[in-house]
Structure formats: C-alpha cells, structure tokens
Amino acid sequence: MAKKFSGVAAFEGNPKWEQMIKRRRPIYSRGNDLRSEFWRDYTRILHSSAYRRLKHKTQVFYSPQNDHICTRIEHVNHVESVSYTIANYLGLNTELTKAISCAHDLGHAPFGHEGERVITQIAQRDISVKFWHEQNGLFFADYLEFLEDDKKNLQPLNLTYAVRDGIISHCGEVDQNSLKPRQEAIDLYQYSHPDQYPPYTWEACVVKISDKISYLGRDIEDALTLGILTTDNLRELSDILELKNDKLINNTIIINTLIEDLCRNSSPETGLTLSEKTYRTLTAIKNFNYKYIYQNERLKASNRYIKLMLNEIYETLKKTYAGKDTKEEIQKLGKYYPNLSRNFLNWISDYWDLERKRPEVLVETVYKVSKDEKSYYKAILDYISGMTDKYAIDTYNELISF
C-alpha cells in the first residue's frame, strides 16, 4: 500500500517537528521566502563549495578522462533519485530526502575510500582520532562551508537538525534488515564512529539504505565498463541475481529489484525492510563487490600513488608549524611551493586564531593554532579532505617539480 508512512513523515504535526527544523543559530529571513525549511537547506547545500567539488572526486575508480565512470557527485545524484522514489511511494518528505542526499558526502576525501583510509592513518597517528567522512561532512557543514547572507557577510550553512543528522548517520553499510529511526535528539558530536546510532527521521533512514542500493549497482556497472570483472566473475554474479544470462546484468535490474522489494515489505511497525531472500541477495552483492571490485589487484597501483601524494602534502605543511609564527613559516614555504603556500594560507586564515583574513566571515575560531600543534594538524587534514582529485595531484606535482 502506497503512502503507508505518511503518518510518521517529517511534516508539521509530527511530535519531532520542532527538533527536526531546529538550527544551531537563527537564520536570516527576507520575509518573502517561498521555500520550506528543508528546501531551503537543499538550495544552501547546492550552492556550497564542498558540493561543487564532488564532481571532481573519485567514487571508486579514478578515471578522470572517462566520462562514463561514476564520480562522487553522480553517486550523490543517484542516492537522491533512489531515495526520492522510495520516499515518494511511502509518503515521506521528499524535500528532506533530497536535502540529506545532496549533503551526505560533503565530507568525502579525494580518491574515494582509499583517500579516506590514508587520512585516517595520519589522523590516528598524529592527533589520536579516526577520520570518517560522515563526521567530516557534518563538521564542514557546521564550521567550514560559507554562504553569503543578506548583509554580504559569510556564515556557515546552518542546516536544520534533521539534515545534519542525516549527514552523520548516513553510513551505507546497512548490516541489519530492519531500520527504524531513534526517538531521542542527541548532540550529533556524540557520535564516535559510523553507524553508532540510527538516524532521527524515517527520511534519513531511507537515504541510508538508498546510499547502499545506489553504489552497489553502479560500482558493478563501472567495473563492467572498465573490464575489471572476468567471465567467471560474471557467471557468479548471474547466479547471485538468478539471471539465466550474464549479459542481462545491469544497474537497472539491480536497483529496481531492491527498491520494489523494500517498498513492498516496509511498514512503520516493521521498519524499512527487505524480504529475507532479497536481503540475502543484497548481502551477496556486497560481498561480491568487495571481493572482485574494491579489493581488485588493478586498484593497488593507484592506491600506492594516492598514499604517497596525500602523505607528502601533509608532511610538507606539517613542518610549517611554529605556534604564533606559523603564518610566517607558511609564507616561507612559498619560495619553493608558491601555489601550496598561497592557497593553504588563504584557506586557513578564515578559521584560525592568528591573523584573520576577512572580517566579513562570521564564524567562530575553528583551529587554535597559536597554542595547539594538534589543532594545526587537524586543519591540514581538513584542507586535504576538501581537495578534489585534480587539485591534490597538482599540489603533489608542485612538490616534486624543480
């Protein structure tokens, strides 16, 4: 039955409504805005720099010259499409699913999950924390991304609680076959690891599942395009999908099967649920992808290159730490690496406790560089995590050029 979740959807009248639309600070109003709270979030995210950079970030395969290989922004659009289909059928708030989907990967590192692994290794070693893109996305939205207000000042995105919650709770590794939202509103910085808590809204639960549905099928399609999978692999996948011919394998079949089954079997009482048979298929597809795609031998050479690049950029900037004199050390770096020196200084001076570059930036101090070495290291990692693939490569090339 369609619209069976309409009674628990994120609309006015829901007992959670006031918390859902709550923002960290008052947001300016022109008095004639035609948008809802969640649609306003959607457009704010759409105009953010972090969202724009997703078009030049790897999803799984680093292949910038191939227009037919999925990038991070395409993946975001796929999640938006899948979540809209599910939410619309179930009677949930599609404006909220669109906003969460659009924002869910704002904190993703360059070069996909390999870039995330490299940054995690550095973060655990130097500042004793684990980098994970869900939390990084929330941090970017709350502190690092700016939009111009009606007085020409630059302020953080200041998103609603429901969208912020959807960002940090979106982890696509859904390993249980029934997903329901939590009831309590928590400080979202209580999260210490991905998937620690279920999302706060049914809409965020939909995005969480849509993330997995979207990437599993598309990653297979990309692997087929690049010739990653062997004939034996395709036979195994045909058996998993119960297809008589491996030539029938495509993203459409995988996604349609999962969406239709989820919509048919879900209810507010049982949660977002797949049939046992389809859930086993989903798990088998995930295992197939990890075995034959994500751990494929052909990815190892690029992974070594990615590790080298990101470590060299980090170590070069790390050496410039000098407490209150850090700005001067960054400027000295410009003798050999003018682009890195200028670009990093332009970026960090909006956020640190040293000389602030622009008075129109209305944001609290993010990095206490004058007294805290680890705060500076975190700033470097945040800077690297925001890079596009191409910008990271260009930066590394400057480091090795004479």
Image: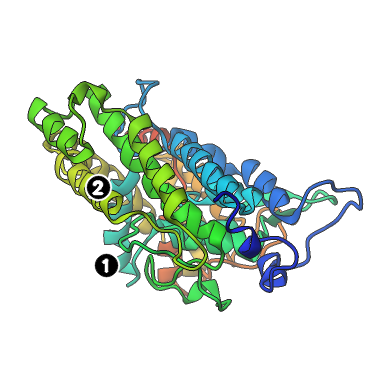
Is residue 302 visible to the viewer in this orientation of the structure?
A: yes
Q: Position of residue 376 (x, y in %)?
A: 45, 64
**Circle on res. 83:** none
72 or 84: nearer the viewer:
84
Identify residue for label 2. 281
Name the residue furthest right: 31
Residue name at image x 11 percent, y 27 percent? 230
Q: Quadrant of residue 125?
A: bottom left
Q: With 210 as the anchor, is 20 left or right in this view?
A: right
- Position above or below: 324 against 167: below
Residue name at image x 18 percent, y 27 percent? 244
Return the disc, 1 or 2, that comes first in the chain's sequence: 1
Q: Classify mark 1: helix, strand or loop.
A: helix
Q: Classify mark 2: helix, strand or loop.
A: helix
Q: With 400 as the anchor, is 141 left or right in this view?
A: right
> What amino acid does circle 2 point to?
Thr
- Position above or below: 34 against 374: above
Identify residue for label 1. 125
Q: With 137 as the anchor, is 114 left or right in this view?
A: left
For the C terminus, the image quarter is top left
